[in-house]
Image (spheres, helix red, strand yellow):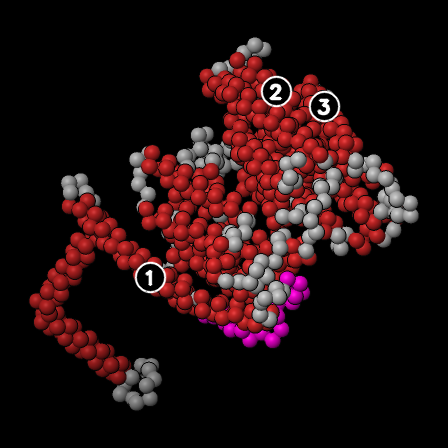
Amino acid sequence: MSRTGLRILRTAAVAAAVAIAVLAAGLLLGGSVAEQVIPGLSDAGAVTRWGLPVSRLVMDLGGALTVGALLAAAALLPLEGGRGAPRLSADAIGYLRAASWLAAAWAAAAAATLIFTVADVLGQPVGEVLTGSELSSYVGQLPQGTALMLVVLLTVVVALLARTTTTPAAAFGLLAMAGVALLPAPLTGHSASAANHSVAVTGVALHVAAVAPWVGGLAIVGAHALRGRPGLGVMAGRFSRMALWCYVTVGVSGLVNVIARLPDPAEMLGTDYGRLALGKIIAFAALGWFGWWHRGRTVPALAAAESGGAPSGAPSGAPGRRASWLFARLASVEVAVMAGTMGLAVALARTAPPAPTTEESPIKALIGYDLPPALTPARLATLWQFDFFFAVLVAVLAALYVAGVVRLRRRGHAWPAGRTAAWFIGLATIVIVTETGAARYAPILFSVHMVQHMVLSMLTPIFLVLGAPVTLALRAFKPARVRGDRGPREWLTAALHSRFTALVAHPAVATIIFVASTFALYFTPLFEASMRSHLGHIAMMVHFLLSGTLFFWVLVGVDPAPRKLPYPGRILLLFVTMPFHAFFGIALMSLGQPLARGWYTAVDPPWGTSIIKDQHTGGAIAWAFGEIPTFIVLLVLAFQWYFDDQRQARREDRKADRAERDGGRPEDDELALYNARLAKLAAKDAEETQAGPTKVGQTEQTEQTEQTGQSAKIADDAAEDGGGGDGKARKP
């Protein structure tokens, strides 16, 4: 093994040792491996008590390293080949192949975690679980088992495809798939059963989604520095900008998770869970110091060395070499701290949070809060319900839009105020149906849920697409600094021109998704399953928003699209689609049996009407609500059609002006060409009119000559026949 390989191996061994040591200390301090076994109850044994957290730690580290390797290949390293045919560099392909092996280790660790989880839940030793039928029987019944099986399947796919992938788009797709594989396992832990599980689930999802690229990305960038490969300055600079946002996300989501599980600050020191959480906070602060040092010292030194200093292969003592060595040393220590923090996080996940001091009602266990009082308009406006996911979504979308507008104005470019107003009206409608009393009553009343559905799918998207966020992003983003590379602007352009976008943005496909998904959701068991899970409920609401945005992008979208319908076609598509929502409302009003009977029976409020009557009311809302977006879209289409004609007229006028100026091309003036064509046709008609009699006389003379010739030929033939009438020639 080379000297560089030994360095990387030594750094990895140190980080693994720190992670295992911190995990063991956390498990002992938290008491999860020293629980007293009650006589008579089954016990999974010490192998499971220690094997489950260790396999979970290996799974988390494998996931982070896989994401880091894919991130380095898809985004951190510059592309090659120019803008016409961008391709991955040799180092990027090497990281893809490394991601294949890392994903395989991730899958193996997830499978081991699955086995230990079943043994832990059943209280049986691992040997009995492996030799018996319990594993196959309980995997599909346990939420943790289903989640881990999904992780195994996704990671195996990533491992197989990463061995043959060579294109930037495919690498980005594998990165997205690996990101999805991170979520199922943590979302079925303590977060799903926390007192405020709606906040806890979203917090955990954001936490994991930010930790993996942060930890894995730093590990791969550190390995790149230890190998002495070129491009470290660009790679470290991109990672540093991403790491800052990851750090902020991890801090905010971690704070939300701690508050959700430890509402009393005194529990931070008075409980095992609180003390472990406090240790994690201290480690997080230390990582912040490392990040500050990188951004202030090592990253600028690397950038300066690559731009004007020594090349990568410079002798020892050169500025570039010293900067790379300093970055690698500091990154190695930071990776070890990160690994220890992940070990502490696994120990924290194995430690039960403090039990709630008050008894939890059955309805609170289902929806996360107590049953609200009887519904009134005043309570809809005042009984706000904080939804962490949609609050973060609205805040991020608003901040990005404002940042884009500010960047354009700093460059001296204007941005229409109407588009900005439309965007924020759309965001305000999201807040109204997800954060106010509507969100509090929607889980227990189908009629209020239908208001959420109609607003998110048929009203909010109209204003969002009129805000033209893609156009704003394309104008605000700067081109990639490295020629032929892909920055945010280039990736967005590639996504707009991709086959997938061309497929889903086809008017027929967008219409089918918009209409058919509604019937497929409500008239199948999928609706009740989505209501019983907060994560499923979020997915359902996001689907409403995305499907509506896709459909109205085709109808009234300002942003560039693969296919633009003419305005008569858009109006026709609108009038063809909207009756289907009216049919959906009529179908709901005609129900004889309630939808999702089990769910609505469990949360049925004593002050409400019957479940079937409430669902009939929801059907009436769906039937009547369609008039509002139809009127808005027709009004928008009328204005767009009018202004489009005005733009076409101004464009033709500018062409004519250019043609009249000196040096202009006559072919640019379409009106002049058309007039010249008419004049030419008129001159030709006049010429034919003047020469008409002469041509007629010539034609008649020609016809008479032809007839005379034919008569002479017939006479000669008759003479040759000797006057016989048999038509046969006679020999002399």
Q: Is residue 494 visible?
A: no
Q: Main secondary structure of the magenta part?
A: helix
Q: Which residues fall within the magenta stretch?
A: 579-603
In the drawing, what numbered circle is on residue 399? none
Answer whether labels 3 and 1 touch (C-beta < 8 Å).
Answer: no
Q: Give me the C-alpha separation between circle 1 and circle 2.
A: 60 Å
Residue 415: which quarter of the image? top left
Disc 1 is placed on an element classified as helix
Q: Residue furthest bottom?
A: 725
Q: Is residue 692 left or right of residue 595?
A: left
Q: In the image, is residue 525 above or below residue 11? A: below
**Residue placed at 86% from the left, 39% from the top?**
36
Q: Which mark is residue 14?
A: 3
| Circle 2: element type | helix
Q: Nearer the viewer, residue 583 or 327?
A: 583
Q: Earlier in the sequence, mark 1 or mark 2?
A: 2
Which residue, given by chain and number where applicable, does mark 2 sit on?
330
Estimate the x, y position of residue 702 in percent, counting from the top left: 16, 73
* Residue 14 in sight: yes
Residue at the image point whose x is 73% and y is 48% from the top: 144
Compared to residue 732, the image places residue 329 above or below, namely above
